[in-house]
Image (cartoon, rainbow, N blue to C red):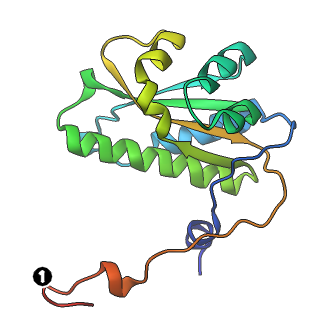
Amino acid sequence: MGNTIKTIFSRRSVREFTKEDVSDDDITTILECGCWAPSGLNNQPWKFVIIREQEKIRKLAECTRYTKTVLGANVLIAVYFDHETSYNRTKDIQAIGAAIQNMLLACDELGLGAVWLGEILNQEDDVNTILNAPKNVELMAVIAIGHPVEKKRTSSRKGLEEVVFREDFNTKW
């Protein structure tokens, strides 16, 4: 089994971080991995905002019920959909999801922990105000990143027999 497949199976959402700083080199690598996600017509419909300033992190923490996770992160990356580069909303949002997944996998490979925060979208207007977001962008997620607190993390998935069909929905896999 290759490294990518191993990482996919072993990566877990991390919500507790140590105080150790995340290097600028690691952040650059994470962002570059996000930018290498596939996108329709190679339009690359994403914009990323790096947040390290503690006052902004504190304000963003007030925008989600996952306050403790946000406050504990060494860095946040807000992920936006740039409407000016869009050609198909569904495909563009899928591309942004692929970019986020690439960044999460990169974090794992770098020995960092990360979690994709989607609940913060309920406070998009507040987040946009805090980050001075222009009108042409739409918040898709915030990724909290840091060095993980060491602990066992587990997860499960539905079996393929629950989610895969052959030829049509009438024939189970």
Residue 121 in the image: above or below residue 147:
above
Under tag 1, what secondary structure? loop
Residue 51 visible in the shown view: yes
Residue 131 in the image: above or below residue 29:
above
The x and y percentages for residue 80 are 41, 28
Residue 140 in the image: above or below residue 103:
above
The residue nearer to you, when weighing 97 against 37, is 97
The amino acid sitting under disc 1 is Asp
Identify the residue at image location x=76%, y=53%. Answer: 111
The x and y percentages for residue 46 are 39, 32
Quadrant in the rendering for residue 36: top left
The x and y percentages for residue 53 are 71, 16
Residue indicated by mark 1: 168
The residue nearer to you, when weighing 58 against 144, is 58
Q: Pick the quarter of the image with the N terminus.
A: bottom right
Left or right: residue 51 versus residue 116 is right
The x and y percentages for residue 23 are 78, 34
The number of callouts visible is 1
Identify the residue at image location x=42%, y=30%. Answer: 122
Q: Pick the quarter of the image with the C terminus.
A: bottom left
Left or right: residue 49 versus residue 37 is right
